[in-house]
Amino acid sequence: MAEEKPLTIWIVSGEESGDQLGAKLMRSLKVRLGSERVRFGGVGGHAMEKEGLKSLFPLEEIAVMGFSAVIARLPSILKRIRFTADAAVAANPDMLVIIDSPDFTHRVAKAVRQRAPQIPIIDYVSPSVWAWRPGRAPKMRAYVDHLLALLPFEPEAHKRLGGPPTTYVGHPLIERLGEIRPAPGERGSVESKPLKLLVLPGSRRSEVSRLMEPFGEALTLLAERSPHPFEVTIPAVSHVAQEIRARAQSWSVKPRIVEGEAAKWAAFRQADVALAASGTVTLELGLSGVPMVVAYRVSKIEEVLKYLIKAPSIVLTNLVLGENVIPELIQWDCTPEKLADALLPLLSETPERQRQLAAFSKLDELMKIGNEVPSERAARIVDEVLTGPAKA
């Protein structure tokens, strides 16, 4: 490097998962560029603050999920968008990195590009343009210089749709396979023990409120039909744990409810089968080797959006695999009877169970990125965009 001038990189995230990605990126950038040479600004949570970020405001002010929740908080979110964009333009950083939460971060990026077009902008985590509203992809080219994708099919999707240059940097889960996967003896044969069944009703209150009742009734039916006894564990995130406990009191099959990441991964390593809400958890289960049934329900307002969905599946693991091996029961199909019917074949060594396990064995090859870990690859692309053309 000809000149060792300090670099200022702004990172703007909008929720906890983005905060975690941002913290790992900051750590890798400090290693790659030199901790004395890089400074950070922007919006983040506790993880990013531990790496040296002083957030413009608490992340909780904008970390809302779901269509209805966003509408309710829209005036305050719009105010924070303007405030963040104003601060970024005034700071004039060497780069702006936006992370996930497109309703917030993309609006910030558009405002910054309009008023300070000299600032390079990287988007870390692709919006689901491959699933719905594909017209967003070409529009992103106006304000995103490079996109860092978490899923291996996304670069090709953006190329097909006319999106910005995109690099697959790897999903953060591939850094955690040692925690997710069972050690020898930790998970035995489904024929030789009481089965361990995971129930994952989601991390949002809206998901929990819509799924706990059909999930509980499905377990009642399953207990009547299953050739094997089973034990149920619910790994619950802290902010919905109390609601899960309250709703589980009416279940005839009483679950064990655990909290915390260590307890969650321990439950995954021992699990034989799972009933899960659609989301990143399906990829976690696939990488752990747990056959599953996936379900989802949305509000009547959000149900209208299903007609805009273009993807062949809503299950991330199915999308990465390129085939629909995991049953998905959505909206009106999410009934106790259908959930129990889909789960029952997974409780024995059946073709349905073996098909899922065989498909999961392909995930490592499909998601690999070589010797780098995802945050290192992301930091490398950020460096390349700063210093020259990025390698797509």
Image (cartoon, rainbow, N blue to C red):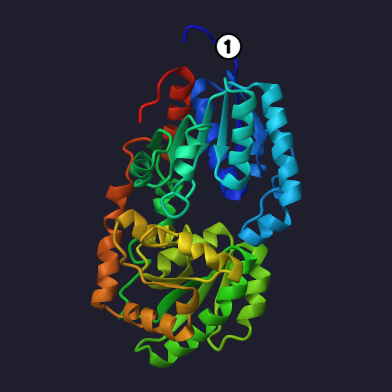
Q: Where does label 1 land, which residue?
A: 5
User: Where is residue 163, by image quadrant?
Assistant: top left
**On screen, 257 above or below 321?**
below
Residue 293, picture quadrant: bottom left
Residue 159 drawn at (x, y percent): 35, 39
Query: Looking at the picture, how far across and down is residue 326, in whole percent?
Result: 35, 68
Q: Residue at x 75, y 49 (%)?
A: 75
For the C terminus, the quadrant is top left
Q: In this orientation, which residue lies closer to the viewer: 134 or 3?
A: 134
Q: Can residue 362 be seen in this view?
A: yes
State the residue in front, 209 or 53: 209
Q: Residue at x 35, y 57 (%)?
A: 319
- At label 1, which amino acid type do we have? Lys
In the rendered view, tell whether residue 156 sits above or below residue 30.
below
Image position of 370 (left or right of 250): left
Residue at the bottom extreme of this rendering: 224
Spot occupied by residue 168 in the image (x, y as percentages of width and height):
38, 39
| Towards the viewer: 110 or 98 | 110
User: Outermost residue toward the top?
Assistant: 2
Q: Is mark 1 on a helix, strand or loop?
A: loop
